Amino acid sequence: MTRAIFSARRAAGVPVWLPALASVAAIVLGWAVLAVLVDTPRTLPAPWTVARLIWRAAVSGDLWFQTGMTLFRVAASFVLAMGVGAVIGLWLGRSAKADAWLNPILVMTLNIPALVVIVLCYIWIGLNEVAAIMAVAINKIPLVAVIMRDGTRALRPDLDDMARAYHMRPLDRLRHVILPQLAPHFASAARVGIALIWKIVLVVEFLGRSNGVGFKLHMYFQMFDVAQVMAWSLSFVIVMLTIDYVILRPWERRANRWRRDEN
Amino acid sequence: MRIELSGKAFGPHQVLGPVTLELAPGRRLAVLGPSGIGKSTLLRIVTGLDDAADLHRQGDTRLAVVFQEPTLLPWRDALSNLTLVTGAPDAVARDWLGAVGLAGLESHFPRQLSLGQQRRLALARAFAAGPDVLVMDEPFASLDPETRDRMLTLTDRLLERSGAGLLLVTHDQTEAEALSATKLRLDGQPAVLSPEKQEG
């Protein structure tokens, strides 16, 4: 039944990427028209001006170095935040006592502005890479912990009973009974997390690093060079979108494979 | 295996009185009784899912449980549901899949199976564990009469084939009769077991 609906939709409709492409094209077109009408290149540069700057940075290699540095920080703080956040979330989900004690702290940390954490990290740890990565991870850990905690609470008791009745080994239970139930929560924590992290990484670089996309934005902001600011932010958005589509989404789809009817 | 317990209480509420059960391969028992009397509680204690104060077990008997619902791992295919959970080798698992009529569906996920097939898969899983005694918790309760009869026949045949004993919990004595199980009645407040009175 579900299978029939799926294939019907696939057969009848336009390819899924077409509306997405069309809407992006519409935005670029609107931007171009606006830029020509307003005609103040200093505050609203045209798309082709920005594109030329991106191209120049790409050819000179600067684009790859700076986005590389930013991506390294994104990856490091992402791994740190997911690891620590997942462990805390599992613990809180399994132990009501731990949850009672730590939930207020969790709610509090969820509401501390990212900027406060960043500033304090830089002051306490110093203007270095460790402080930058820590600051980003700390901003993200509570969110991962909350998502994973709720996922852990939703674990099915009947499967737990079954695993115990059949004396499954602890490691097998973790791998085949518990983790598959948590995988969708882990995937959505990762998706939400990566979106949050790369924005905070730019702020961290803006405030206290001497390379990376955030540093470039800081530099061109001080020169009031809007075209360069747009060029750097746009190229980084493209990089992040590519990662989302090429790595995160296929992975999430694979994790959810068993939910679908087809083989 | 002999199981003796002096009782089970939830808070101040005494559910079970003293109960003694003797389980053995080839021995088929059916515990009958109205719903809510504590049949499932007794079964959870027997299978070790709940503990009771003052519980004595003598002898080591392998139990395998068939739950009210199939309770399969939805993210693992039919064959893995048998091998991963019971530790049975591939060949044994395939053999039991064939015995319940699921040959050829090894790589299907539970969602892709009908409810009847899922129940048979759960039955195959229990037998793949190589139990001395099969424990069933109202496994036929929500089935339509025709499917129920088929499941009963299949269960009977597989019990015969494996030589395993049976502990069946049900509220329907025709199921006990179909599996030629000795009927015991769980009744009272707190509930105790007594041999079922013969009719007629």
Image: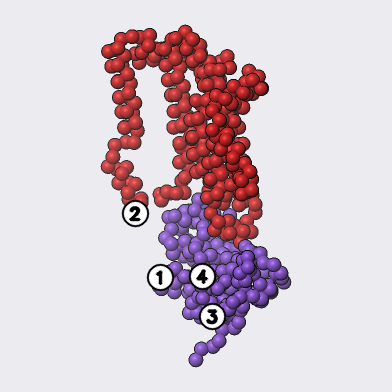
Secondary structure beneath dot 1 equals loop
Amino acid type, label 1: Asp
Rendered view: B109 above or below B194: above
Q: Chain of mark 2?
A: A
Both labels 2 and 4 in a single chain: no
Residue B138 is labelled as 4
Can the viewer see residue A44 in this picture? Answer: yes
User: Does residue A248 appear left or right of residue A48 in this picture?
Assistant: right
Q: CA distance from mark 4 to mark 3?
A: 16 Å
Rendered view: A121 above or below A9: above
Residue A1 is labelled as 2
Q: Chain of mark 3?
A: B
Amino acid type, label 3: Ser
Residue at which label 1 appears: B144
Q: Which residue sits at x=57%, y=14%?
A: A210
Residue at which label 3 appears: B180
Q: CA distance from mark 3 to mark 1?
A: 21 Å
Amino acid type, label 2: Met
* Pointer 3 local density, CA inside 10 Å: few below 14, some 14–19, many at least 20: some
* Pointer 2 local density, CA inside 10 Å: few below 14, some 14–19, many at least 20: few
Both labels 1 and 2 in a single chain: no
Shade of chain A as shown in the rendered figure: red
Q: Chain of mark 1?
A: B
Location of residue A113 in the rendering, given as x and y in whole percent from the top left corner: 54, 28
User: Quick one: which chain is purple?
Assistant: B
Q: Total of numbered circles in the picture?
A: 4
Q: Which residue sits at x=61%, y=75%?
A: B190
**Sequence-earlier tag: 4 or 3:** 4
